[in-house]
Amino acid sequence: MDRSWDSEGEAMYGARRFSQMHDSGNWYAVQTRPRHEQRVKQELCNKGIETFVPTISEIHQWSDRRKYVEVPLFSCYAFFRVADLCPMRYLILTTPGVLRVVGTQQHAVPIPDREIDSFKQLVSSGVPMANCVFLSVGQRVRIRGGALDRVEGILESAPGQEKVVVSIQLIQRAVSICLTGYDIEPANTN
């Protein structure tokens, strides 16, 4: 057992440190039990694993008061970095609150450093943000509100400069429209 110190300077005794807290290895995600993101983060840190749980500040209303509360940006997910996942997999999966390592079948899928770095920068900047629906280029979407309410098409370009292609498949003709000022959502595929 080794000794480390918590944020208040008190000694913590934890498991042997298996990895060092430095910028090496790949980032991965774990799915957690609901409202266990911070506990998983702390447990993995106690095991010497670098972790990241992006949070945002929200106003919560109780019957007698309103208060700003830090909540996870991505509910039920925490991120961790290890140099080699194979020897660490059991240690991670036996962490209280962890349901699974995110990936395909039995293979964890690493997250590019640039994606985690972007979220770290967003969180540290204090820029207001909120969750939104994940959309990808080529996906069928529906416009919400305004003169184009309920028009469906295929998302043609990245968020922030959205263009949608609206087409008539039978005659194989289409138009591209710019969506500045419109909200879009995934279209039902039924």
Image (tube, grey):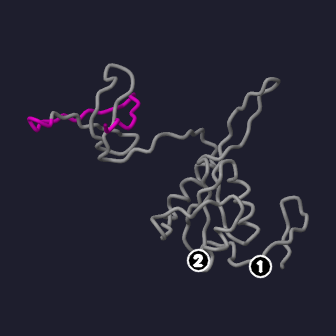
**x, y percentage for residue 91?**
67, 73
Please identify the quarter of the rendering in which residue 28 is found.
bottom right
User: Where is the C terminus found, in terms of image quarters?
Assistant: top left
Name the residue at the left extreme: 171
Q: Residue at the location (15% across, 33% down)? A: 168
The residue where tag 1 is placed is 16
Range of residues picked out in magenta: 169-190
Name the residue at the top extreme: 147
Q: Residue at the location (28% across, 43% down)? A: 156
Please identify the quarter of the rendering in which residue 30 is found.
bottom right
Name the residue at the right extreme: 10
User: Is residue 80 shown left or right of residue 112?
Assistant: right
Crowding around mark 1 (Cα neighbors within 10 Å: few <14, some 14 to 19, many 20+) is few
Give the amino acid at mark 2: Ala
Q: Residue at the location (22% across, 35% down)? A: 176
Number of marks in picture: 2
Q: Nearer the viewer, mark 2 or mark 1?
A: 1
152, above or below 27, in the image: above
**x, y percentage for residue 23?**
61, 72
The residue where tag 2 is placed is 83
Q: Secondary structure at mark 2?
A: loop
User: Where is the N terminus found, in terms of image quarters?
Assistant: bottom right
Q: Is 103 included in the stretch rendered in magenta? A: no
Q: Residue at the location (58% across, 77% down)? A: 83
User: Is residue 149 shown left or right of residue 113?
Assistant: left
